[in-house]
Image (cartoon, rainbow, N blue to C red):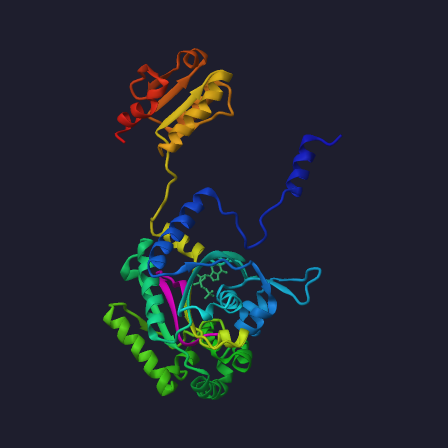
Amino acid sequence: MASEKELTQKTRKQSFQTPRGMKDILAEDWLYYDFILQNAKKIFEFYGFKRIETPLLEEAELFTKGVGKKTEIVGKEMYLLKTKGEQGFLALRPEGTAPIVRAYIEKGMFNLPQPIKLYYFGSFFRHEKPQAGRYRQFYQFGAEIIGEDDIASEVKIIMLSKIFLESLGFAKKDIFLLLNSIGCSKCRAVYIRELKKYYRKNNKQICSDCRRRIQENPLRVLDCKNEKCYPVKEGAPFILDYLCTECNNHFKSLLEYLEYLNIPYILDKTLVRGLDYYTRTVFEFCLDDEKSKISLGGGGRYDKLAEIIGRVKKPGVGVAFGVERLMEEMIQRGKGFKSAKPEVFLVYIGEAAKKMSFKILEQFRKEKILIGENLEKNNLRAQLKNADRLGVKYVFMLGQQEVLDEMIILKDMNSGLQELIPLDKIIPEIKKRLNK
Ligand code: AMP
């Protein structure tokens, strides 16, 4: 027979863990997730945004076509599945915009009065290198306005994003809005030609990744994080100098609105974002840490996405926030949450009292008064230990005799005084004592 030590070692070896880069969301985390979602809902629903949830799985082609085969999140980080009966591959969704635009087209939302305003809250999957603030499964809150190319869509998304961040307790002065325009396909092509020319000239001063990027996905050289490339990046041509008249007017109009609404911004010529579908406006909301800038969320305009994935010519603008990032930064900045604690506890002795306890607890729930209990434990001392641990002010005690007399004992834990109370007076009595 195996010894106890061998058994423990075996159990340890056979115990399972969350997959790398993924995490359990525990009760204390949900306080943040719920708070973040509630705040987002209040703000975005006021402006007519409706909730949408698309499947976790989509046809992989939706992302290769819509987001771009050469982007990191599709080309390198997408989880692909081959299932029985499926023609091609399915993908665990790496981002939310392409699925929503797919639903917009599939459900004929373009026939409804435009624009369509939608928001979502759910899990996304990217096979990234796990590190602080970077997971392989993470939550995003996102919002999209589809159907109009008017600047009001961008202004609304940016304004509400800022209000949302402030509602989570981030100080106005700590939130940075980085802004850029990457133009339309016409002016971007002119810019890319210049960028390639410039990078080719500086070929020796850049990293090997950038040498590849400048061929495959040229704009991405601008957000290379390799220090070697910084001086070259600094001297690179600025896309804003290459915008065509329409793109330029569109961007100028956005800046005017932001100034009018007192929304400060920083023009960032290296901001291009990682997804191919963006056109014109791109933006990112960051927090400035002493060491680095932390991206909380970002988005932009995607005027060609619906056309690429469904031959429907409808423009759109969207934003997505990383919920884990928001939560981690809230904790860093001392915005803590604690679960509500009951001030009252119910203990029982004997079967009749145990049964009656279920009815009493329901009375408290209906009155929204938190009450602790430990009905699974028949031992009185164990129940009282729990009440003690919670530090409640009052304990109700129910035994066989009390059930027969339709009475209950109420103990004041501070003074230690006990008194008998009629069972049908529990609620008014405790409300009086708790000043409710
Ligand atoms: P994106 O969808 O890439 O535009 O990212 C929007 C936001 O989602 C980022 O600013 C992050 O806050 C968050 N995010 C993106 N990737 C991850 C990840 N791997 N883990 C956690 N959060 C992420």
Query: Quadrant of the rendered structure where residue 41 is?
Result: bottom left
Q: What is the x, y in percent for residue 431? A: 29, 28
Q: What is the x, y in percent for residue 61? A: 60, 70
Magenta span includes 289: yes
* Residue at x-position 34% and y-position 22%: 426
- The magenta-colored residue range is 277-298
Between 312 and 436, the one nearer to me in the picture = 312
Q: What is the x, y in percent for residue 209? A: 54, 75
Determine whether, in the image, residue 211 is placed left or right of residue 328: right
On screen, 277 above or below 238? above
Residue ranking furthest to the right? 1
Q: What is the x, y in percent for residue 207? A: 52, 77
Query: Quadrant of the rendered structure where residue 414 is?
Result: top left
Q: Specify whether residue 196 is in view.
A: yes
* Residue at x-position 41% and y-position 48%: 34
On screen, 132 above or below 354? below
Quadrant in which the N terminus appears: top right
Q: Specify whether residue 276 is in view.
A: no
Q: Main secondary structure of the magenta part?
A: strand
Quadrant in which the C terminus appears: top left
* Residue at x-position 49% and y-position 56%: 122
Query: Quadrant of the rendered structure where residue 180 is?
Result: bottom left
Magenta span includes 278: yes
